[in-house]
Amino acid sequence: MNLESPTKVVDKSPEEVYQFLMNVENFETLMPENTKFEKINDTRFLFALKGMPEIVLDLKEGVPHSKVVLGAASDKLPFTLTGNITQIEEKKSEVQLLFEGEFNPMMSMMIKGPITKFIETLASNLDRIDS
């Protein structure tokens, strides 16, 4: 299952967006309201959307100023969440979130709606990045 957020333009340089996304603690500010969030360590956090099980994400990869990849820590829900960052101007970037996971058809049907809404919320909250 591959899902894409709408592209979000933020008034920050790619470096600022990258640094923000590489700090897992900052994902709390991007989360939908009423989402459980807990930083586990510098590269791992736990979150739970309403009506969904708790999910632990690990910071898997960072390509300076262009890409940040988070992945599920559990093999039960194998997926990645990638933030692609593209420079538009010196202090303006485009960010798009991509969700990629391998789920059986029943699971895909159940989670597609909540996950789509989730990544759209994360993307729309990117304007909360402050430096």
Image: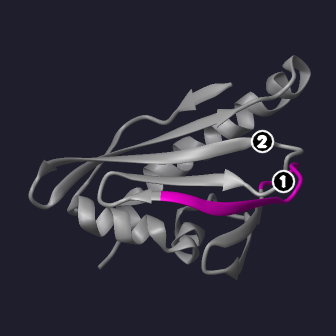
Task: Quickly name the residue at label 1.
Answer: 74
Residue 79: quadrant of the picture: top right
Task: Quickly name the residue at label 2.
Answer: 78
Residue at x-position 89% and y-position 53%:
53
Measured as percent of width and height from the top left, residue 59 is found at: 59, 63
User: Is 67 placed left or right of 31 in the picture?
Assistant: left
Residue 45: quadrant of the picture: bottom right
Residue 127 vs 99, above or below: the answer is below
Secondary structure beneath disc 1? loop
**Range shown magenta:** 49-61
Residue 33 vs 23, above or below: the answer is above
- Amino acid type, residue under disc 2 in the picture: Pro
**Magenta stretch containing residue 55, yes or no?**
yes
Instruction: Point out the image quarter for the C terminus.
Output: bottom left
- How dense is the environment of label 2, judged by Cα within 10 Å: few (below 14), some, or many (20 and up)? few
- Amino acid type, residue under disc 1 in the picture: Ser
Residue at x-position 63% and y-position 34%:
100
Which residue occupies the foreground of this view, 49 or 79?
A: 79
User: Is 123 placed left or right of 13 in the picture?
Assistant: right
Secondary structure beneath disc 2? loop
**Magenta stretch containing residue 15, yes or no?**
no
User: Is 72 placed left or right of 60 in the picture?
Assistant: right
Question: Do the CB atoms of the residues marked 2 and 1 lie less than 8 Å apart?
Answer: yes
Measured as percent of width and height from the top left, residue 14 is found at: 25, 59
